[in-house]
Image (tube, grey):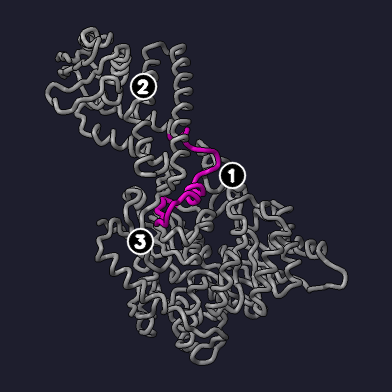
């Protein structure tokens, strides 16, 4: 048994055989259905034939240029290609163990290496490199165009725990909770989009589990503890029994809470709306007591396809459904928050054989051409989205939310586009009214100029995930610094206070839609700073509502006023612990620490 | 079945290209060819498998035992032993 610590990003516990997805080194290892054995054998044979052609061509070329002696090396490689210990061995593994071709090939190579490992002679030991060269060629030739992770997920024969070095949100969005029991990945943090998706799908997940994908043998039993933030490889029966007992207690705990408006102990009304990505989450949102959708992440409609893959009509139908199914509550739809690579539809990074995506000039990353910047550059796609939203307005209360706005100019440009879209979709005698347009406050420049933005923005929504990342200069996808991602950093509390203070006299509502509010201590401080409108993952709403009922606004205000003057997040946590002792035993503890149940 | 022990003489030992020559030479004959390190006789590898030969990790000076079994075993053994003892045609 091996235990690997990580960040608990999606609650629950699950165990099952591991399915491995290594994207950085494109290797996928998973069990296949019997019906696919012949196909995998065929892929091996095709890869061998293709590799042989390539090696013969190289051999001819090298003989001409560098002479027969060096060329013989490739003759040796051709012999390796035909050797019984390699491809025939891999074929045997595919048939006997029903695993995919890549995995079988790796296994055959591993077996060779295991014997070779204790070779004393350094020169001879290096000959392993020649074999690795051949295996690498076979592996490349095995890769069918445009397949990758999705094929693996489509191929899974039975439920498994997905273990990945990194997990693209577009891939995570398409996970089937019936097949994917749990998730463990090496990168990411609690606010990584894939973590958010895992929570919305109810799949227990652990992020930032260093080197987990390299330590796990595919098919090995693995347990993911999304409460404690731990991955257990080869858990013994007693560990599984404990997990099973815990899961049994969890199920009824979330049920039985009454929806409806909620107020603090001293009578301040607080609204909780839901962050969702997909229509299917609406039932969960309503059941959790959400009074509207505060953030609909529309980019997930694309499911990893290009920015123009989902046309106006298709979008309109989704937005209309969301609005109608949430009625009478309002719905806030955020326009596509994509980076350039995602907008190209190739963000899975697996579309090409030789990693061209990685080497491409398309910007990929938090500070590049993304979100509103990208939409303003893709006017056709942006216009289609705005027209779809303007049409959805006829069916109920819908608002447009712009991601990643950093200046008044961007907002004005988007507003002009919305006006145009509204005119284009206007129908005689059916004036549904203007669609309110607001912006995310997630870039420090926007937070500092809320008073200037208020002239053009109808509302604000603080996106704490990105705001914290940019205020603290922490790349939350980098596991080595993810620990510095600190929602209780004094700077964050001050920024939130600043935004509220600038927006209030201008009568612009401010909501907060980050994961931060799912942390009970942070929720109390945010209340105290004057935030009374929250949007969060549906699963987090019931407990947040319960907490609000028990807290007095007056006490929260006093605590917040004191907290903004404290030097460290540790001091702030201590303050919370002394003023609100009940928080210590509150279910989702700080950093999502596990709580005592049952 | 006949066998003989010979010493690897070339500087680089039974490396990839040398092993390739051995496999090519062995492939000409019908008989079964196996090879083992003289000092570690437990591991016999297929003399027609380049990966098998690499696994022997036979450096310069290593003694290897070649076994041939089949109709043309005498010619095969002679040819293969010659190949090893002449250093696979490599310099030094």
Does the magenta portion include A410?
no
Report which residue position mark 1 lands on. Answer: A362
Q: CA distance from mark 2 to mark 1?
A: 41 Å
Rendering coords of residue A11 (x, y %):
41, 68
Q: SS class of the residue under badge 3? A: strand
- Residue A486 in picture, x, y percent from top left: 43, 66
Q: How many marks?
A: 3
Asked whether A37 or B88 is in front, the reply is A37
Q: Determine whether the residue tagged by mark 2 lies in a helix, strand or loop.
A: helix
Find disc 2 in the rendering and name its residue.
A79
Residue A30, position as x, y percentages in the image: 41, 48
Which segment did they paint magenta? A139-166
Front: mark 3 or 1: 3
Give me the C-alpha separation between circle 3 and circle 1. Answer: 38 Å
3 and 1 marks on the same chain: yes
State the residue at coordinates (40%, 59%).
Answer: A207
Q: Is residue A358 left or right of residue A232?
A: right
The residue depicted at 82 percent of the width and 64 percent of the height is A423
């Amino acid at each position: 048994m091996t235990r690997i610590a990580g960040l608990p990003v999606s609650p629950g516990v699950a165990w099952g055989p591991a399915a491995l997805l290594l994207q950085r080194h494109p290797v996928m290892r998973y069990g296949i259905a019997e019906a696919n054995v012949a196909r995998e054998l065929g892929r091996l044979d095709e890869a061998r034939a293709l590799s042989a052609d390539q090696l013969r061509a190289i051999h001819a070329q090298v003989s001409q240029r560098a002479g027969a002696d060096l060329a013989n090396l490739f003759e040796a490689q051709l012999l390796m290609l035909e050797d019984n210990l390699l491809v025939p061995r891999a074929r045997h593994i595919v048939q006997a163990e029903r695993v995919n071709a890549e995995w079988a090939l790796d296994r055959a190579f591993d077996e060779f290496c295991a014997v070779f490992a204790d070779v004393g002679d350094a020169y001879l030991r290096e000959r392993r490199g020649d074999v690795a060269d051949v295996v690498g060629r076979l592996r490349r030739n095995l890769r069918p165009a445009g397949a990758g992770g999705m094929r693996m997920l489509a191929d899974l024969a039975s439920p498994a725990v997905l273990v990945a070095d990194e997990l693209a949100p577009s891939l995570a969005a398409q996970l089937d909770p019936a097949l994917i029991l749990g998730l463990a990945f090496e990168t990411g943090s609690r606010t990584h989009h894939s973590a958010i998706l895992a929570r919305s799908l109810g799949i227990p997940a652990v992020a930032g589990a260093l080197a987990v994908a390299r330590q796990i043998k595919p098919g090995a039993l693995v347990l993911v503890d999304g409460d404690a933030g731990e991955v257990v490889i080869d858990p013994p029966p007693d560990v599984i029994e404990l997990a099973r007992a815990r899961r049994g207690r969890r199920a009824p705990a979330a049920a039985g809470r009454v929806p409806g408006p909620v107020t603090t102990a001293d009578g301040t009304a607080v609204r909780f709306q839901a962050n969702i990505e997909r229509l299917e989450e609406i039932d969960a949102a309503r059941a959790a007591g959400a009074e509207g959708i505060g953030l609909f992440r529309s980019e997930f409609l694309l499911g990893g396809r290009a920015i123009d893959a989902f046309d106006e009509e298709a979008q309109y139908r989704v937005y209309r459904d969301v609005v109608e199914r949430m009625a009478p509550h309002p719905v806030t739809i955020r326009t596509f928050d994509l980076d350039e690579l995602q907008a190209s539809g190739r963000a899975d990074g697996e579309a090409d054989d030789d990693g061209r995506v990685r080497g491409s000039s398309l910007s990929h990353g938090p500070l590049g051409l993304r979100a509103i910047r990208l939409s303003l550059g893709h006017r056709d796609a942006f216009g289609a989205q705005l027209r779809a939203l303007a049409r959805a307005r006829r069916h109920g209360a819908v608002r447009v939310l712009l991601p990643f706005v950093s200046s008044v100019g961007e907002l004005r440009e988007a507003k002009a586009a919305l006006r145009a879209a509204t005119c284009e979709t206007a129908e005689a005698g059916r004036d549904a009214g203007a669609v309110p347009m607001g912006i995310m406050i997630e870039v420090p420049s926007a937070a500092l100029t809320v008073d200037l933005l208020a002239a053009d923005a109808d509302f604000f929504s603080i996106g704490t995930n990105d705001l914290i990342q940019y205020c603290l200069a922490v790349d939350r996808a980098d596991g080595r610094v993810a620990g510095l991602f600190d929602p209780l950093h004094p700077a964050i509390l001050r920024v939130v206070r600043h935004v509220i203070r600038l927006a209030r006299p201008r009568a612009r509502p401010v909501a907060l839609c980050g994961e931060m509010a799912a942390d009970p201590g942070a929720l109390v401080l945010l209340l105290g700073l004057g935030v009374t409108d929250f949007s969060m993952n549906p699963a987090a709403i019931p407990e947040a509502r319960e907490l609000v009922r028990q807290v007095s606004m007056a006490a929260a205000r006093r605590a917040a006023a004191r907290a903004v003057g404290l030097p460290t997040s540790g001091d702030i946590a201590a303050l919370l612990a002394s003023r609100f002792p009940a928080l210590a035993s509150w279910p989702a503890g700080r950093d999502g620490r596990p709580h005592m149940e049952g | 079945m006949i066998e003989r022990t010979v010493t690897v003489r070339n500087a680089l030992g039974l490396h990839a290209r040398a092993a390739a020559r051995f496999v090519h030479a062995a492939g000409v004959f019908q008989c079964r060819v196996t090879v083992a390190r003289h000092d570690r006789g437990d591991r016999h590898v297929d003399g027609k498998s380049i990966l098998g030969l690499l696994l022997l990790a036979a450096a310069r000076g290593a003694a290897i035992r070649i076994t041939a079994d089949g109709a043309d075993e005498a010619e095969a053994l002679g040819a293969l032993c010659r190949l090893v003892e002449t250093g696979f045609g490599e310099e030094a």
